[in-house]
Amino acid sequence: MSATTRRDIDVLVVGEINPDIVIADPDPVPVFGEVERVVRSIGMTVGSSSAIFACGAARLELRTAFCGVVGHDAFGRFMLEAMAQRGVDVSACSVDPSRPTGATVILTSGVDRAMLTSMGAIGALDVDAVPASLVSRARHLHSGAFYLQETSRDRLPAFFTAAREHGATTSFDTNWDPSGRWDGGVAAMLQASDVFFPNAAEARRITGIADVDAAALALAELGAAGRSDGGPIVAVKLGVGGAVACRAGGPIVRVPAMAIETIDTTGAGDSFNAGFLRAWLDGEDLRESLELGAVCGALSTRASGGVDGQATLAEAREALRAWAP
């Protein structure tokens, strides 16, 4: 069987798995001193950057598999069942009875949010334990929440490099750095990746550059060092400002945000990533990839939580035709 026909996984996701407990209200801020407040809703849904991305990719008809770790508990069972129901192959995920499944409490007003995370098994994935046979079947490898990958963060660049050497493309998202250091190996990841997906705040903090365009170019230049292929695409998510992307040396490509009545922005960046990669893996150019990413990110905000509003491929394409940025 040829290498091409063996790649029956479009996207292999390696990363963290945890549910989100979403507290939604126009003013979700608690009041200490044993004060009880009534809020609009509290619900549990698929959480974590990597898992939300995987669900979005599967929703866009990408054959998606996941390798991660959960605890032997209700949160872990919920996550594996919910991801499988959304079309993600979780057969390579493992259960660690010595750790609880991580969880994030999100307080969201619909336009802004705050998060409290208990790590549990969030950083437990060991990339050395990812089956080589699984990686060899994947067209593309993605990881989210780079800063939370405690067990494997220092080995992820080599893992990505090996995957690229065997014909896969790669992408990653850092998300927020709870340590506040904003380093942790991002340069090495950039040099091992084809696409990097920071948001504006992350790009600024990683580079120390206030101007987003300049920060994106600096990240692209950093990733291009020592490479002959032009280096990675850096696609920066700007929320209501849309998104920009570039390679080393530019030019900067920019798209606006698609207007939509927003219910909850949780996971919108991960849905953007899924839309961008759907188009990019289909051979679309940088602008077209940004546009599908922007559509998928916007549509994901039409429901509470990170996955319930995610678009099907047909919905995303129809919205893109109607939007015509």
Image (spheres, rainbow, N blue to C red):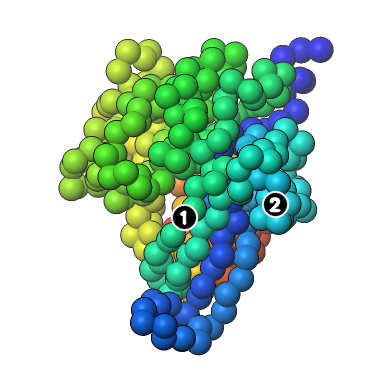
Q: Image height check: is 212 above or below 29?
A: above
Of pointers 1 and 2, the one earlier in the residue sequence: 2
Q: In the image, which disc is placed on residue 73? A: 2
**Looking at the image, which residue is at 35% across and 55% down?**
238
Type of residue at label 1?
Thr
Type of residue at label 2?
Asp
Figure quadrant of the N terminus: top right
Residue situated in front as seen by the camera: 104 or 57: 104
Q: In the structure shown, which secondary structural element does the residue marked by tag 2 occupy? A: loop
- Side (left or right) of 206 relative to 138: left
**Looking at the image, which residue is at 41% across and 86% down?**
35
**Looking at the image, which residue is at 67% across and 18% down?**
132
Residue situated in front as seen by the camera: 320 or 144: 144
Which percent across, then down, holds residue 192?
43, 22
**Looking at the image, which residue is at 51% across and 58% down?**
104
Which percent across, then down, holds residue 62?
68, 41
Q: In the structure shown, which secondary structural element does the residue marked by tag 1 occupy? A: strand
Local packing at callout 1 (Cα closer than 10 Å; few below 14, some 14-19, many 20+) is some
Q: Image height check: is 52 above or below 148?
A: below
Residue annotated with mark 1: 117
Residue situated in front as seen by the camera: 50 or 321: 50
Task: Report if residue 281 is visible in the image.
Answer: no
